Image: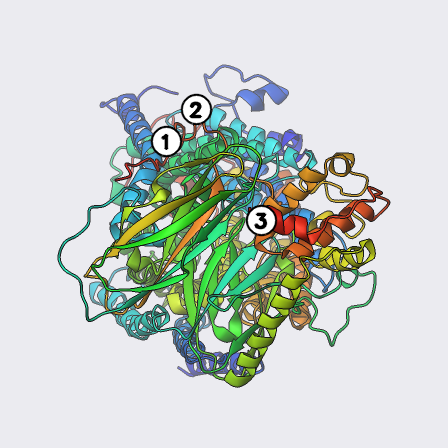
Amino acid sequence: MRTLLVWLAGGGLFAGSLQTALANGWNMPVGVTELSGDIYSLHMIIFWICVAIGVVVFGVMFYSLFRYRHSKGAKAANFHEHTLVEVVWTAIPLLILIGMAVPATATLKKMYDASDADLDVMVTGQQWRWRYEYLGEDVAMTSNLATPRTQIRGEEPIDESANYLLEVDEPLVLPVGQKVRFLFTSDDVIHSWWVPDLAIKQDTVPGFINENWVRIEEPGIYRGQCAELCGVDHAFMPIVVHAMEEEEFETWLADRREAAEQEAMGIDREWEMDELMTRGEEVYNAVCVSCHQQDGSGNEPAFPALAGNQEMLDDRDWHIDTVVNGVSGAAMPAFSNTLNPVEIAAVITYERNAWGNDSGDTVQPSEIAELLSD
Amino acid sequence: MAPKVPPQPTLEQSTTAAAGHGHAHEAPPKGLMRWLLTTNHKEIGTLYLIFSLTMFFVGGIFAMVVRAELFQPGLQLVQPEFFNQMTTMHGLIMVFAAVMPAFTGLANWMIPLQIGAPDMALPRLNNFSFWLLPVAFTLLLSTLFMPGGAPNFGWTFYAPLSTTYGPPSTTFFILSLHIAGISSILGAINIIATILNMRAPGMRMMDMPLFVWTWLITAFLLIAVMPVLAGVITMMLMDINFGTSFFDAAGGGDPVLFQHLFWFFGHPEVYIMILPAFGIVSAIIPTFARKRLFGYASMVYATAAIAILSFLVWAHHMFVVGLPLVAELFFMYCTMLIAVPTGVKVFNWITTLFRGSISFEPPMLFALAFVVLFTIGGFSGLMLAIAPADFQYHDTYFVVAHFHYVLVPGAVFAIMAGVYYWLPKWTGHYPNERLAQWHFWLSVIGVNLTFFPMHFSGLAGMPRRIPDYALQFADFNLVASLGAFMFGASQLLFVAVVVLCVRGGRKAPGRAWEHAEDLEWSVPSPAPLHTFDTPPKFERSSH
Amino acid sequence: MTTPQSSDDPRKGVRRTVWRSVAALLGMFAFAFALVPLYDVFCEVTGLNGKTNNSAQAVMHDGVDETRLVTVQFITRSGSGLNWGLDVETRQLRVHPGQPTEVSFTFDNHGDGESWGRAVPSVSPSKASLHLRKISCFCFQEQRLGAGERREIPLVFQLSRDLPDDVNTVTLVYTLYPVEDRDAPQQASAQSLEGEQS
């Protein structure tokens, strides 16, 4: 009996150290929504039930191993069946499971109620970036990894203050206190949009639409990552959500709308080569670099080289068509979904004149706009 | 290429040292041809085990590459493309070329011995199903050298990443999986035919050792789900090469359908890799506790219950693909139910230990570690079954920790326990106890150092299948990598123990373990090439 | 193999077992393929995965529920490889359950050649997809557009009156995909999107 107590105490000690570990951030975040809190409690309840069962079961096991050692002359008993005991240890787990299922069912039902949302955001996964559209607001943006590739490849030291691999150029901005409904889809393969603090993880399936929702309770910046293997740069498509007060959000939204209008006005005018090259380099380094590489060398066979690509330089229309409409059945997406005419024109101009490519021609935003409208 | 390597001659000679003499059988061909053409269940079993061990190291090297890259943040050793190929190949090789053939090898060796049959029911088919395996996996490994590289879409090969966006080698991957699948199916037919028809006179189904029982149920699972896998990969093949659209939304198909079909195969597959392990542990624990297995009948029923439930839980791998609420609830409840028969098994093993007379030989050490660590894997499985919480766990390192706990200290430890348990029967020598103990303790420590921190990194937000990670996960990954190197290196000890045991060592009598009761212990050690040519008289020990 | 070991010939039993196993195998292989259409039927019956009915449905004449207004959103997306645009006259509507509504979609071929495309629908929340009745829809058929052609095609739909009470917003997404090989677009496919447009 004393040994049993010793083992139980050992188990308790183990549980205690687990508790310490979990309390020190080695655990699921409580998060900043009501549901994330519910999920966290559910997780902890079930965790402690498992620990309790473990302490009892392993306690009995180690007690037996210690107490009934052959080397200490233990004589084996001769029982090998006991119907009552067997029925009891089938029934008790069943009851425990029912106890677990009740709160789990309640939480799940809450998660599935996306009705009466204040704001709809469409999230589109794309190899390897996220696109966000505020439905009905005429605001949309693309969110790319901001960590420089040179840090990832070890060519310069990792900046420890810059949220390595968890920083983007354009965070998703959301209002606090409002019910935001997300619609998820994908342009290519299945991705999964996951932000632990919001307790949302939802697959984005090409051709299909999923939904989930969130009501953030605290302003702040929340980070996550793609959670479904989606190809080479699966590790490099983070998610950053910037939650702000409603008024601040409305101001932000208005500013974005205005900026989009400004950009739209730029479509009609004639752009200089230099302007296009500068803008094009920005776009290229945010969007194209992950496949076609910084020096345009590509990554055969999936991602063709752009530097010195004669086919591309000879056939300007084909080049434009490929960027605008993508290539069906290949990794090249249709950028008309993602980029505006200015950005498309600039990046094509850049590709035709960078890394020793010398077509000398420019592609004007107006051409692209015309292509997309007629 | 590893699988082309012919079996080691030293192993050949001694495992079958007592072969042939005094038998009226034709003289077997010598050398390589003998191994190519053998129809003897013991020799084929040995071939399976050597193949599986080789592949365990090949898959292990892939795992070491993965862990080395994850040793610290940033990309140091390999590029993401190659990293993805490594995780994919590690998974495929370990599942289809290491764990499954190891169990088939043990089945080949032990099932005829345990039921008192002279051989498997279909010896030539047996030879054929083994030799399909080296073909299949040479093909799979050769994709590493193809343009575009090996499969890089994870061992679950979700469409459309594996179809529209897959590398050119995908077609070869499909072909190799087809061949491996045919091998498993033929093996399963053979095992069912043997168990149902070739038992010693007087041995009823409920007299069979649990290893035989669990394998019978496993074989039924294989027959039920391997054709589904074949169907899925055939559909992939057609999508890739013949323009169909089973899984392509553009043509009216559905990528989620792929996942339903894959997991309809995939979940029973998980049990295919663990049920025979239950059988092995159920043989070892009573032997070294010197006490009959508690609840034999309930063990059989629990195994059958797990097998049946395994067909009703597949979508718990898909809680975040956007299933409707009712489906989430149904699959959550069914998954939770599996805890009941699994619990019964654990309770039975522990009650067998209770008031026994326990000694700690190497097979027993591995079996006990199995019970503890598999149960920990079971607990995390139960947590994963809770659908709302799974929205946080899904596709993180928590899942990686979970399935490695059930597969490494689960399935792999059980296989090692089985090898240590039956080595005296195969070779006539006891394995070196001191070395085996070192192997055990280093493995247990290594396995926990590797996989326990993964629970925490997963909970803290690290997704699986990433070659590089944010800085807050660095400590967990450092520990996991060190543990993995330790675990990997300590498996060399296992090879040393096996080779030494084949070569020599303390002589083992027929009944190598004093309390071992099944029929295999009634033949001499090492077991002669031909056993039970005259069926033994089976005496019921009041099961 | 050695001689039979008991009076009733095990080889006969083995043969029987093998044939039964092979039959089971073939059955399961066929079952895997049968799961494809079964899954479609299952999706249509339960609305799983936001799949909608692929053929036209008749208008239900059981009155309009004037007391309830449901928001219907339309989203159009273009997939890669097709130089088309798809637009809808209105992004959002409020309708009463039971009320047939017509919305006009515009297909636009920006390219300078004839091409085939198809708009693949998906509905969210998925439980609403059962209650979205499409009386006439371009999504049942592949479209052919000549160079620079623009075509307006109406969608006529109706939300059935038994739409669950907690559904206040229904989102209908159309994604444009190219039809690569028009000569044999469906023959080898598991699913048929062909249907009668009424």
The residue tagged 2 is B125
Colour treatment of the image: rainbow
Residues at discs 1 and 2 in contact (Cβ within 8 Å): yes
Residues at discs 2 and 3 in contact (Cβ within 8 Å): no
Residue A289 appears left or right of C130? right
Pick the quarter of the image with the N terminus of chain A.
bottom left
The quarter holding residue B184 reads: top left
Q: Give SS at disc 2.
A: helix
The three-letter code of the residue at mark 1 reads: Ile
Q: Give SS at disc 1.
A: helix
- Residue at 61 percent across and 58 percent down: it is A129
Question: Which numbered disc flags the more N-terminal residue, 1 or 2?
Answer: 2
**Rendering coords of residue B286 (x, y %):** 39, 56
Of residues B29 and B20, the one drawn nearer to the viewer in this rendering: B29
Q: Is residue C157 above or below residue B226?
A: below
Q: Give SS at disc 3.
A: helix
**Rendering coords of residue A3 (x, y %):** 45, 80
Q: Is residue C19 above or below residue B100?
A: above
Q: Which mark is residue A372?
A: 3
Classify mark 1: residues with Cα within 10 Å, few (<14), some (14-19) or many (20+).
many
Asked if marks 2 and 3 fall on the same chain, the answer is: no
Q: Nearer the viewer, mark 1 or mark 3?
A: 3
